[in-house]
Image (cartoon, grey):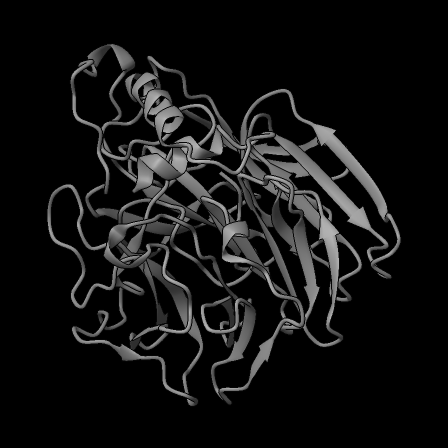
Amino acid sequence: MTWLRNVLVDLADDSPQVDLAERTIATHDRRRRTVISLLAAATVVVVALGTTVTIRLLPDRPQEAASQSDLPARGVGPLSHAYKTFCKPDSGKAPSGCRDGGWRVVTRSGKTYHVPEALPSLAPGRTGLRDSPLAISRDGRKIAYYSAEEGTFQVRDLASGQKTTAASKVPKAQLGSVSRLMLSDDGRFVAFSKVPDFKDPALLIDMRDGVVRELPNRWVPIGLSRDGATITLAEYSPRSQLRTISNLWPSSSKGDSTSVILPVHYFFSPLAPDGKTVAVIENRSTAEQPCRQGDLIMMDTLTGKKRKTTVISGLPSDVSQISLRTWLGAEEVTALTMSVRCRPASEVPDDEPAIIDSPYRTMTAYAVNVRTGKARKLATYRAQGFFEIVLPGPPGAL
C-alpha cells in the first residue's frame, strides 16, 4: 500500500472526490522509474514511507514481547513508540499477530498492545485504503487517535484509562491518504492535517473546552505552544515551507500568520525546545542520485535563516535515509535512519513490477547533538518505512 499513499499525495490540489484509481496507476507508472526500489518512495519530495515493528527498544532493554493483547482499560506505563502493521509484505514475514492496518503501542519496558479502538488504515478484506493517524504525548503517557466507534479523535490517558472525545465529528472520508496528528504535552490539544485536502480544513481541537480552530491543510503540525495559541507547521510538498500562526484563540479570529518559502527541499524536525528553531537536513536526491542528504542545519522558523550548520558524525557509512524526530533535550534531536540500496532511475527496468506492500526493513534511531554533530545509538526497529512509526512528541516532516 506504500506506493499508493505516495502517489495520492501528488493528486491532492483541487482534486474532486472521485475514484482516482486510473490516474493513480498512471502516475505511479511514470514515477516508478525514479523511486527507491525497496521502498517505492518519491525521490525528491518523500524519500521513504512505511510501517514499523520493534526489534529492540534500547540496546540494553528487553525485546518486544512475542505475544500481544488489546490495550488494557488502565494501568499502562509510558510508551516508547507506536507503529502500524500491514500483513502482506512483498517479501519476508509480517509481524507476529499482525492486524492489517492496525496500530500497536510499545511501552518502555517492552510490553506491546493492539489499539482496537483506533480505526484501521485498511477496510475489511483490503477493499479500501485510508490513513488513520496516532500521536503520543511527549512524556509517553497519553495517546490520541481516530476512534472508529466515535467517528472523531480521542485522547486516552494510559495510566488512568480516562478517554476524552472531541466534541466535533470528523468523517472518515476526511482522513486522507497521508495524515499527521500532534498531541500537546498535557493532552488538551490535538492538531490534525492530511493530504489530499479536498475542501475540508486541517484542525486544531481543544479537547477540554470542545472548540475547534481551522488550519490550512497539507501542512504538518510540528510544534505547539503550551497554551495552544501558537502553532508551527511545515510543508514538504510541492515545496518546503515553514509557517507560524499565533493568536489562534478565539477560533473566530484569523490569527497572525508568518510563512517562509525555502529555496530547496528539506526534512524537518519537530520544533526545538527553544520554540524558535527547527533542525533540518537538505534533501539532495535526484532521479539518478537518490538518497542524498546534506548536513544538519538549525533554522529560524520565522525567517528561514540558517543559524548553524553541522556535519553529522557517528552514523554508519551505509545510512541512506534519515527522518528527524523527537527532541531529547536542548541539544539532541532523534535521527531515525535506514540503510537501503538506492538505485538510479536508469537501473530500474520499465517492466519491473510495482511494490504494493514493502518488505520490513531495519531502522535505527540515533541521538544527534546539534552543536557537535556527534550521533549516539538509541534503538533499533523493524519497519517498512518511516511514515507509520510514531515517537513521543510532535512529528517531523519528510
Q: Residue furthest left?
A: 92
- In the figure, is residue 23 to the left or right of 111? right
Q: Residue furthest top?
A: 346
Q: How many marks?
A: 0
Q: Residue at x 41, y 88 (%)?
A: 73
The quadrant where residue 299 appears: top right
**On-image quarter of the N terminus:** top left
Residue closest to the eye, 302 or 46: 46
Is residue 140 in view from this perspective? Answer: yes
Q: Residue furthest front?
A: 18
Q: Residue at x 53, y 42 (%)?
A: 397
Q: Position of residue 102 (x, y in %)?
A: 32, 62
Q: Is residue 294 above or below residue 349?
A: below
Q: Position of residue 360 (x, y in %)?
A: 21, 48
Q: Position of residue 353 (x, y in %)?
A: 17, 26
Q: Is residue 21 above or below residue 271?
A: above
Q: Residue at x 38, y 52 (%)?
A: 388
Is residue 305 in view from this perspective? Answer: no
Q: Position of residue 317 (x, y in %)?
A: 28, 33
